[in-house]
Image (tube, coloured by chain):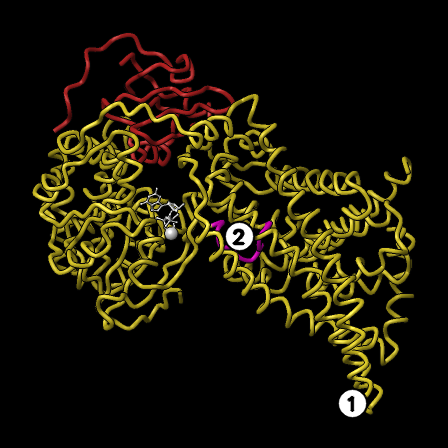
């Protein structure tokens, strides 16, 4: 699943393209055996993935981020456009949604102009059938001049026929002619392109349409061509809008009309009277009254599964009973017997021992919690509930200058902030991306951290968990509100699609959970070990007592925590969750207020190294540094204020 | 190529349409910015295709050919519709 390098070797390439959430990634898995994340919301794939297809080991198949339309308007759509421009594109496999042919054909109308041989996989035919929609596949294939294969990607139906159809891929017949003035412009630009900057694979006419539609990637490509200048000049002169519609909107409207006409001739609708449980759940999820109780219900169910079953029952079994009573005493005895050097044995099984601290934290404390969390999360992702949350949360997000679309990266941040930072690509403006990235870096705890928080606070009382949640939400809203005032730009109102609620697919949930657990083990454990090593060294050279006394005014005075908690903050610099574990082991010395204040401060503290790297990659070093410089003081400020406020009551 | 447009009738705002009603999108007001206009076209919200209004609060939700679309009132207010 490597992302696209700028200098990708030119191999025979096929690409799955289509609208968001139509099943491209499921098909990719079927065609290559390589699993990439599949979820029931638009915007799961935000980077191009690549693998060798089973049918031709010398070729390369791409899974691309879904595009609502081309020209590309968001960063994930731009990634798709970049792949189309820079790869040796031999076959496009458009993945369409059989229950919505109008939209599918709308995109076909554009893809058809690119002059690349195409095949259409008409996916979700099961859902179309359930809704009484039938598509005349033969007639559609006839009109388009390309093979059209009905598929049910999740059930593996039609995959063999689809693979066979690749050999018959053909350049489609154009679906429509635009109005006379647009056609004139298209021909003009296309002629210039053909003369000055011909593309090795893509047709000049298609590129001309994209250029007139102001596609930023095609423009960037053109700027890099030696003969690009005269073409870009000609495009710049075409700005004149006709009536109130700009050229891009006129192109989109005409394509839509063309798609509508064709869709009508090949689709039949019967009233299926589909009244499933999923449909009802979908309605309740966005209902103006029932929507909120459902949010709370879902949260409580997750709390029971992760906070009680994972953090209480499973951790109890593993940490106290198994590691505490059986494994660690045995390992300690073994090491002390066989390692004669005291400091070395201390390094392994001492107070800051690699096994007794690092591995025990990672395996006994956090692993059970993240496992339950990833399972719950995967089920929710597959159900389609997250997309509906954006409707419920839209008002709240309006207050912080965002719209409900930002719900998705933020919720994904609860899984892993690093990956979620990448998902901010689905947002439409730089401003939205910036605010969302900042809020996630500050106030969204990732699964590992959430696990420790639930483990500690859940053990104290449900109320403590509620206070922690309320504090974090307040920080999120207040900071977001401030950020939206400081960062200039307009808020974009939300227009979004709500995918149908579906029964989660067990196999998919397990696969995704497995992949995420692997990430956890590979990324978190080495850091935990490194952190333990640092603590061990600090302790050995006598720096720890010094740090503890140096941190005293801040940690003891301002935050009201025991002096030993300073160590947790040192650990927190490596990973917030590691720091949180440092507090977790102090739990017997903490009262409720101290536990809440400590956890709130550590939740806000600093983003982990991996997510910091991701912020640098997506936003640049300067912005990342600025964010960091604001986050650390904010954490201590909030912690101290919270300490003060809570002391008034408890 | 454009399908026959229905005879001009009374136009109302999408936000003013009762739940459960079938309507046709007549036009987008000038207040909707060009990028969003393009987005609405891409979702298939134009032409003479009827959509069903599913709810108005907290956002306007319409069913357009088996796909639910949610629109914030700031946008839906400027979408003009006529009875289907
Ligand atoms: N009922 C049904 N569901 C399907 C089918 N194909 C995919 N799905 C479901 O549709 C959802 C989206 O699938 P993905 O493969 O992630 O879609 P995608 O096109 O890659 O989406 P993006 O990456 O967001 O562009 C998942 O919940 C799948 O389980 C199908 O043929 N029938
Ligand atoms: Mg995908």
Q: Quadrant of the N terminus of chain A?
A: bottom left
Quarter holding residue A27: bottom left
SS for dot 2: helix
Q: Is the residue A140 above or below the residue A3 in the image?
A: above
Q: Nearer the viewer, residue A102 or A53?
A: A53
Query: Residue A84: image x %, image y %?
Result: 26, 57
Residue A597 can be seen, yes or no: yes
- Letter of the chain that mark 2 sits on in the rendering: A
Quarter holding residue A569: bottom right
Q: Which chain is red?
A: B
Query: Residue A331: image x %, image y %?
Result: 76, 78
Report whether A15 appears left or right of A356: left
Q: Which residue is mark 1?
A: A338
Q: Nearer the viewer, residue A331 or A286?
A: A331
Q: Which residue is mark 2?
A: A420
Report whether A546 appears left or right of A76: right
Classify mark 1 as within 8 Å of ligand 1 or not, answering yes or no.
Answer: no
Chief secondary structure of the magenta span? helix
């Amino acid at each position: 699943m490597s992302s696209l390098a700028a200098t990708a070797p030119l191999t025979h390439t096929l690409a799955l393209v289509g609208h968001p959430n139509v099943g491209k990634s499921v098909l990719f898995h079927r065609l290559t055996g390589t699993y990439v994340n599949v979820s029931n919301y638009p915007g799961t794939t935000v980077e191009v993935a690549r693998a060798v297809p089973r049918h031709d080991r010398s070729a390369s198949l791409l899974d691309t981020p879904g595009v609502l339309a081309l020209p590309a308007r968001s960063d994930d759509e731009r990634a798709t456009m970049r792949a189309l421009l820079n790869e040796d594109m031999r076959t496009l496999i458009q993945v369409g949604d059989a229950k919505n042919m109008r939209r599918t054909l709308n995109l076909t109308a554009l893809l058809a102009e690119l002059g690349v041989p195409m095949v259409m996989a008409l996916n979700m035919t099961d859902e179309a059938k359930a809704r009484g929609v039938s598509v005349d596949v033969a007639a559609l294939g006839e009109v388009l001049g390309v093979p059209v294969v009905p598929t049910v990607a999740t059930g593996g139906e039609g995959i063999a026929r689809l693979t066979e159809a690749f050999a018959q891929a053909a350049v489609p017949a154009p679906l429509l002619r635009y109005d006379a003035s647009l056609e004139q412009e298209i021909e003009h630009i296309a002629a210039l392109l053909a003369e000055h900057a011909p593309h090795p694979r893509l047709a000049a006419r298609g590129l001309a349409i994209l250029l007139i539609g102001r596609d930023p990637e095609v423009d960037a490509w053109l700027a890099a061509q030696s003969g690009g200048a005269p073409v870009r000049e000609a495009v710049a002169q075409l700005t004149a809008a006709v009536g109130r519609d700009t050229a891009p909107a006129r192109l989109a409207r005409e394509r839509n009309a063309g798609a509508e006409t064709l869709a009508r001739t090949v689709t039949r609708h019967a009233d299926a009277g589909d009244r499933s449980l999923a449909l009802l759940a979908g309605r309740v999820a966005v209902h103006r009254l029932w929507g909120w109780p459902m949010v709370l219900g879902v949260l409580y169910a997750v709390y029971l599964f992760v906070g009680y079953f994972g953090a209480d029952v499973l951790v109890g079994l593993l940490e106290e009973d198994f590691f505490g009573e059986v494994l660690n005493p045995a390992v300690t005895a073994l090491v002390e017997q066989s390692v004669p050097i005291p400091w070395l044995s201390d390094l392994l099984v001492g107070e800051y021992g690699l096994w007794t601290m690092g591995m025990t934290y990672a395996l006994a404390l956090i692993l059970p919690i993240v496992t339950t969390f990833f399972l719950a999360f995967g089920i929710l992702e597959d159900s389609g509930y997250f997309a509906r949350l954006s409707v419920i949360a839209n008002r709240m997000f309006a207050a912080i200058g965002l719209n409900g679309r930002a719900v998705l990266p933020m919720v994904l941040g609860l899984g892993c902030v690093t990956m979620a930072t990448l998902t901010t690509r689905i947002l439409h403006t730089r401003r939205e991306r910036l605010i969302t990235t900042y809020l996630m870096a500050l106030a969204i705890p990732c699964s590992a951290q959430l696990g420790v928080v639930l483990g500690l606070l859940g053990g104290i009382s449900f109320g403590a968990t509620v206070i922690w949640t309320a504090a974090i939400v307040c920080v999120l809203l207040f900071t977001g509100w401030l950020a939206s005032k400081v960062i200039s730009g307009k808020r974009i109102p939300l227009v979004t699609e709500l995918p149908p609620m579906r029964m989660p697919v067990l196999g998919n949930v397990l696969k995704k959970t497995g992949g995420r657990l692997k990430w956890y083990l590979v990324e978190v454990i080495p850091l935990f070990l490194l952190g333990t090593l640092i603590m061990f060294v600090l302790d050995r050279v006598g720096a720890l007592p010094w740090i503890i006394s140096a941190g005293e005014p801040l940690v003891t005075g301002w935050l009201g925590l025991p002096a030993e908690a300073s160590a947790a903050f040192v650990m927190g610099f490596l990973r917030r969750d590691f720091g949180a574990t440092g507090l977790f082991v102090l739990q017997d010395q903490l009262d409720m207020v101290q536990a809440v204040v400590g956890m709130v401060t550590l939740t806000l503290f600093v983003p982990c190294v991996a997510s910091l790297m991701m912020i640098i990659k997506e936003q640049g070093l300067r912005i990342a540094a600025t964010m960091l410089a604001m986050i650390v003081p904010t954490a201590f400020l909030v912690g101290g204020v919270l300490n003060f406020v809570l002391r008034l009551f408890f | 190529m454009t399908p026959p447009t229905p005879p001009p009738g009374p136009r109302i705002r999408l936000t003013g349409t009762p739940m459960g009603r079938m309507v046709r999108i007549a036009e987008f007001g000038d207040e909707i910015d060009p990028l969003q206009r393009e987005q609405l076209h891409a979702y298939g919200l134009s032409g003479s295709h009827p959509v069903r209004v599913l709810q108005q609060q907290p956002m306007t939700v319409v069913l357009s050919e088996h796909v639910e679309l949610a629109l914030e009132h700031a946008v839906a207010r400027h979408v003009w519709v006529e009875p289907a």
